[in-house]
Image (cartoon, grey):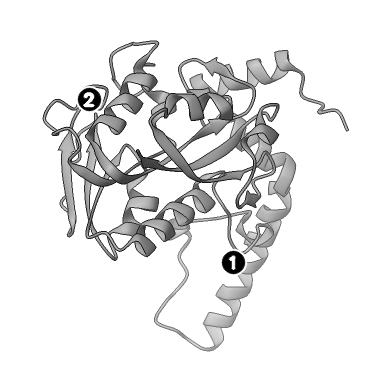
Amino acid sequence: MKSPITPLLRFILIQGNALFPSAYPFLRTIAGLKIAKGVVAYYKDYFQYRSLNSKIKSPFEIKFLHSYPFYYDRYEEAGGILQHYFYQDIWAANRIYRSGVKKHYDIGSRLDGFISHCLVFCKVIMLDIRPLRIKIPNLEFIQADCTNMRNVKSKSISSISSLHAIEHFGLGRYGDPIDPWGYKKAIDEMKRVTKKGGSIYFSVPIGMQRLEFNAHRVFNPLYVLKLFNGCSLVEFSAVDDRNSFIKDAEPNDFINNNFSCGLYHFRKN
């Protein structure tokens, strides 16, 4: 079935959401979760609680000025999966855990996802162009522009990753310098600092290759293989357009996808 959202309408919604970030999700919530029904249910529960508590007093008295309503949680599922990240973070953390490394380097991945998983079983040295002011056990942070990791020795790292990050490099979204080749410079640096036989865990959006400035790039999955020349592909898995995880996939099957996620495990030759 053809999507009712035309390219022009999609463009208008994306631009509007950039200017008013709460507007589009709010409208979607009204349509999908029937917020008016949730308001009715909320006040029904409110008065029922007040009635019951007047008969059998609990230490938690209901007060209108302390109200903190959530109108639509009752209509959601028991849990949600953030597109790409849930499967991606488990995929990479599982492989790093099984590798047995005691120290792992990462460039720009999610702190509250993949990196937090890894901190359970190994030390992580995290590199990002933005500052990190909190201190976390087992985590070492280095603020750096990873298109030029001049302070990291060549062939010095046995395990390194960058998950859903390098597609942003050189677009200015995170305050980084504009550079159309920023992604390639970062990949070349990853290869330079990785020792022979070392592992590189890498993910980016894949599908029909394009730039969606300044959000991200979407890569042809075969182009990613060319970018990692000098490395052998150990595994390619993916999260497809429907957010389903596919283990041991074929890169060629994703070249016409819209917005999937390619999960690459390379070994440095």
Give the percent coordinates (x, y) of residue 252.
66, 32
Give the percent coordinates (x, y) of residue 1.
88, 33
Instruction: Give me the residue at 38% from left, 51% from top.
Output: 114
Cα–Cα span, label 1 and label 2: 52 Å
Image: 187 above or below 181: below
Callout 2, which amino acid? Asp
Instruction: Give me the residue at 50% from left, 30% from top.
Output: 225
Q: Nearer the viewer, residue 260 or 221?
A: 221
Task: Give the side of residue 31 with respect to residue 187, left or right.
Answer: right
Q: Nearer the viewer, residue 250 or 56?
A: 250
**Secondary structure category for the residue under label 2:** loop
Callout 1, which amino acid? Tyr
Image: 64 above or below 32: below
Instruction: Give me the residue at 73% from left, 44% from top.
Output: 32
Instruction: Give me the residue at 35% from left, 38% from top.
Output: 269
Dot placed on the residue nearer the N-terminal end, 1 or 2? 1
Tell me, yes or no, if residue 167 can be seen here. yes
Give the percent coordinates (x, y) of residue 264.
48, 41
Task: Give the side of residue 145 with respect to residue 55, left or right.
Answer: left
Q: Which mark is residue 46?
A: 1
Q: Judge the density around disc 2: few (<14), some (14-19), many (≥20) Cα neighbours within 10 Å.
A: some
Q: Nearer the viewer, residue 31 or 118?
A: 118
Give the percent coordinates (x, y) of residue 52.
58, 81
Q: Judge the density around disc 1: few (<14), some (14-19), many (≥20) Cα neighbours within 10 Å.
A: some
Q: Quadrant of residue 175?
A: top left
Task: Give the side of residue 5 with respect to residue 124, left or right.
Answer: right
User: Which residue is the site of mark 2?
Assistant: 145
